[in-house]
Image: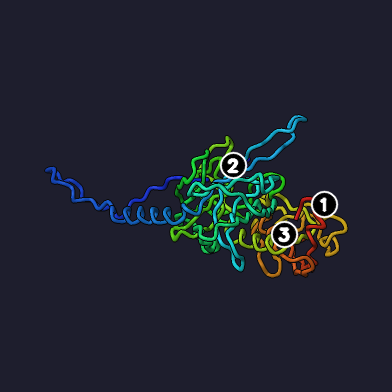
Amino acid sequence: MPRYVMPVFLGICSFLGGMSAVYVGARGLPFAQADTGGSDLSRLSDRFETVARKVSPTVVAIEASKVANKGGKNKTVEESGSGVLVRLPDRKGVYVLTNNHVIQQASADQINISLADNRIVRPAQVWTDPESDVAVLRVDGLDVVPTANLGDSDQTRVGQWVLAFGSPFGLNQTVTHGIISAKDRGQISLGNTIRIKEFLQTDAAINPGSSGGPLVNLDGDVVGINTAIASSSGNNSGVSFSIPINMVKRIAKQLLEKGVVSRGYLGVQVAASFEAADAIKLGMDRAQGALVETVYADTPASAAGFRANDVVLEVDGVAIRNENHFINLISSMPPGQRVQVKVWRERRTVQLESEVGDWSKGQSRFRTP
């Protein structure tokens, strides 16, 4: 199983441009001059350097101390991570984006933020969303500080170069590189509180101390917040995960406007995976959708007529890729909205209509979509 590690990043990818060569003849004639693609490598190196100069001044190191009860005794626990200075739409001032697990349960006066110019400040206000592992900190008195540009994570492409910034092992202002390995990853276990997952996967080497640092494209735009690795040992395995910045922006907007994130739910427990063997047994020709294991009583799902072993195929015309996609889609909907749901039941499709419930009221009963 993957381990949840407080982290930054990245792996190393080689680049060879337009190589050409001519074989040595029988009499030992010399090779033709090989085109090593040096100019391409130089341009790529220059781009890395440009992005590093642009983004590094916006990266911060974060230390949080809190009192925790361990073995019946109160002890001070130190957490460390990273963050990035940004400006948010329709908001004055400067904010730090980071992970909730970096600062969880710490008050504003227990959090120290170290800037690139070695200044140390404390946040004036803190907002957190444990279910997505996003945290937003407002920092006053930094109107002239450099801030990072927030990009569009929907435009990221598999194979695209990215740079990651942070403070692994306390080594502030570290920058590493890799590529986007996959998108929409959610089939990973990150503890009991993190329920909303649609990560960007990279071949990034995430290490303790760099959680919350920015993942950026070669335009220097932030496309993700570095969060975790998949590892059986706690060491880098080349499989790393970042929260897409578009999700972070949506969550930050709600946190600053309402103080909390509003989420919907239906009241079903879906299977952690839906394999080909399951699909074949149910008479389906592909393993796509979310398999319902349990329908809870007195919920919108029970009122709509959901049943165990239904496979959710579509919600309001959107094809459901997997269980995580279903959870995220329903969670993003406002309570009270009515949705059309197509399910596979007893070897045929069935259309259901359901109201979306208010997760803030339903979550005390269970921890499901």
User: Residue 133 at x, y = what percent?
Assistant: 65, 51
Residue type at tag 3: Gly
Separation (CA) of disc 3 from disc 2: 24 Å
In the rendered view, does 140 fall on the left or right side of 155? right
Q: Which residue is mark 2?
A: 80
Q: Earlier in the sequence, mark 1 or mark 3?
A: 3
Separation (CA) of disc 1 from disc 3: 19 Å
In the rendered view, does 73 fall on the left or right side of 8? right
Q: Which residue is mark 3?
A: 259
Residue type at tag 2: Ser
Residue at (60%, 65%) from the top-left corner?
Answer: 92
Secondary element type, mark 1: loop
Q: Which residue is mark 1?
A: 364
Q: Residues within 10 Å of mark 2 (few under 14, many from 20)?
A: many
Q: Residues within 10 Å of mark 1 (few under 14, many from 20)?
A: few
Q: Earlier in the sequence, mark 3 or mark 2?
A: 2
Secondary element type, mark 2: strand
Residue at (74%, 34%) from the top-left corner?
Answer: 69
